[in-house]
Amino acid sequence: MTDVQKTDVQKYARDCFRGVTSDRLGVELEFLVFDADNPALHVPIARTASALPALPGGSRVTFEPGGQLELSAPPDVLPAAVAKLAADVDAVRLALARAGLRLGGRGLDTLRPRLRQLREPRYEAMAAVLERPHGLTMMCSTASIQVNLDFGEDHHARWERAHVLGPVLVAAFANSPADGWACGRQAVWGRLDPSRTAPVAQSGDPAGDWARYLLDARLMLVREAGGLRPVLDGSAFRDFARVAGRPPGHADLAYHATTLFPPVRPRGWLEVRYLDAQGATEWPVCVAVVHALVTDDRAAGIAMEAARPSAHRWADAARLGLADPDLRRSASVCFAAAAEALPRLGAEPSLVARVRAFASRHIESGRSPAADQMEEMFA
């Protein structure tokens, strides 16, 4: 790749950190969908789609390759964003119940075998490139919460906070027990291509770090006249011209970025991608805590001091959850700081109460939600 092309990558990376300076919140909820009478059955996407109602909060509906339902709420300030999405989730939950379906409440499907329902070229390429069986498990059997945040006045600070807090928040909301892991979903991601799933390096230069990540990550596909061609030889984006027979354009780079899945990703806003799906009534706690700890400076200062010693313990957090005493102690400080900050951010008293109740049930007892799931599995 020429120096000019590397400069284009650097410019693109800088643009990923340039967004509005407000404090809006956007949320993307993924749910596994089950047949209420026979949870071992796969639910066709068409069956789910036909049961969906009009959504009062304006969320966009999409589906993941295995049939997971995704609701993406339009960005808004905290109380409005949560209220609108909660209305949509309630509407979906009730409509699906009438159709004999239910929303799952965990981040990994360990009941049904992997089955890919969507066959778009993007997913064909992904299935060809990502390691098996873990790539197929990621595509078809996982569900997460993605919290999207504006960068505010200081993108560097929020970028750092989202990373440093990651292991503590993974442990606090671990909700996908499998094979001895509290967060089995994160274990699946950890077994995929690290060039596209590992955390972005933290050198103090977010845009520079992201540019290097873009260049070094493996190419998943190249666009050609006949469609999309998977790249199977391990070439990185910096090898694009050799692989494609032409220099990369802006559209090639932008699409390449959508095939990268680090725990935190910049897109003109901040994507926090490392959180397990929660139940239809528990997800607001996850969203509120992340929003408070990343955007409220006072809460962030307290939380960062508590979380920094565990900032690189991603695997420990996923395996142990809150059973790890250091992660539990850090989570206790973080949740207290979030609960204190939420009224300043306009949160309703009922949401603050739910955060405190979650902390009492899970954080102070050292029991991630996965512990409850394990009890249900072996009851």
Image: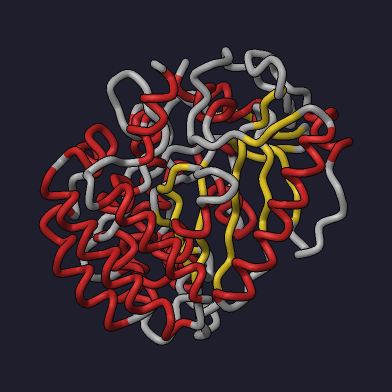
Rendering quarter of residue 83:
bottom right
**Residue 192, x across and y down, in percent:** 39, 29
**Residue 292, x across and y down, in percent:** 39, 72
Residue 62 in sight? yes
**Residue 16, x across and y down, in percent:** 49, 68
Residue 247 in sight? no
Q: What colour scheme has been applied to the protein in the rendered image?
A: secondary structure
Left/right of residue 247 with respect to residue 363 in the rendered view: right
Rendering quarter of residue 151:
bottom left
Number of numbered callouts drawn: 0
Rendering quarter of residue 38:
top right
| Along the viewing direction, whichever of 365 and 144 lies nearer the viewer | 365
Q: Is residue 37 above or below residue 176?
A: above
| Along the viewing direction, whichever of 176 and 274 lies nearer the viewer | 176
Q: Residue at x 58, y 60 (%)?
A: 27
Q: Is residue 134 above or below residue 186?
A: above
| Along the viewing direction, whichever of 302 and 72 lies nearer the viewer | 302
Q: Is residue 285 above or below residue 44?
A: below
| Along the viewing direction, whichever of 256 and 90 lies nearer the viewer | 90
Q: Residue at x 69, y 52 (%)?
A: 89
Q: Residue at x 23, y 46 (%)?
A: 365
**Residue 258, x across and y down, in percent:** 56, 49
Left/right of residue 75 with respect to residue 52 in the rendered view: left
Quadrant the C terminus occupies? top left
Q: Residue at x 51, y 69 (%)?
A: 350
